[in-house]
Image (tube, grey):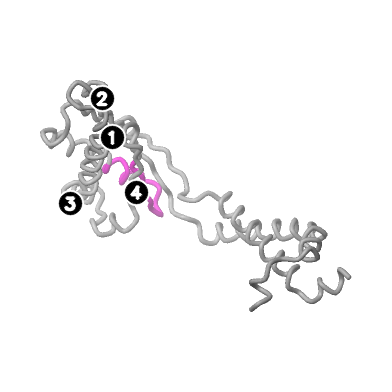
Amino acid sequence: MNLLFSPPTFDDLYRLLRAWRLWLVGALLGGLIGMAVYVLFTPAYRARATVMVDFNVEQSWAEIPDREVFYFLERETRKLVELAWADDTLQTVAGQTGVDVTTLRSGVLTLSQPSDGGWHFYADSADAVLAVQLASAWAKAFTAKVAASADQFTPYLVITPTQIQDLPVTRSVSIGTYALAGAGLGMALLAMFVLFSPMTKTSSR
């Protein structure tokens, strides 16, 4: 236990530097294993719809002091997020796609928003077609709910769907990510082997 938590010595670092070939082997094997895991357990498809949210802050400056602009944006953004995940919004998506609300909230849908700008509505599914339907239905339902609740938001808010048809579909995690993670893990394991294996300590003397 003390060996694990003790700081590395110069000899330890020297052995690591001399074992650079093992690092390359570990990275190569780890990358191949990562890609094999990707093939065996391929992640779900992910579709993305986009809605442009513009608070038109410059038009509200006459009414909102500069020091309150940040609070204003945070408040309005929070209300929009709540509306995106509201029961009525997700019930609309469920009715159009056949996926129940509980499932939608269990990680199938993901919202990514920068506050003022393009809001991305992601949907994951093993079926690429269903992923597109989910993302598109969610973005459309969100847009409709905002329009129906316009009196609850700043009058300067403008919501514009910019991509709700012919959506891009990719895997939720790329094969490159698996390969990179596998390569890093392979290098780390071989580094531990070099540091703590009696064989490498003996051979370096």
The residue that appears at 72% across and 66% down in the rendered structure is: 8
Tell me the crowding category of disc 1: few under 14, some 14 to 19, or many 20 or more residues within 10 angstroms, Cα based.
few
The residue that appears at 62% across and 58% down in the rendered structure is: 182
Q: Residue furthest left?
A: 151
Mark in the foreground, 4 or 1:
1
Q: Name the one closer to the observer, 69 or 53.
A: 69
* Residue at numbered disc 2: 56
Real-space CA distance between mark 4 and mark 3, rounded to the nearest whole angstrom: 15 Å
Residue 141 in the image: above or below residue 27: above
Real-space CA distance between mark 4 and mark 1, rounded to the nearest whole angstrom: 24 Å
Q: Name the one closer to the observer, 76 or 167.
A: 76
- Mark number, residue 175: none
* Residue at numbered disc 1: 70
Q: Tell me, yes or no, whether the two marked residues, 4 and 2, touch with CB atoms within 8 Å.
A: no
SS label for mark 2:
loop
Q: Magenta stretch containing residue 158, yes or no?
A: no
* Residue at numbered disc 4: 110
Give x and y (percent) for residue 93.
Answer: 23, 47
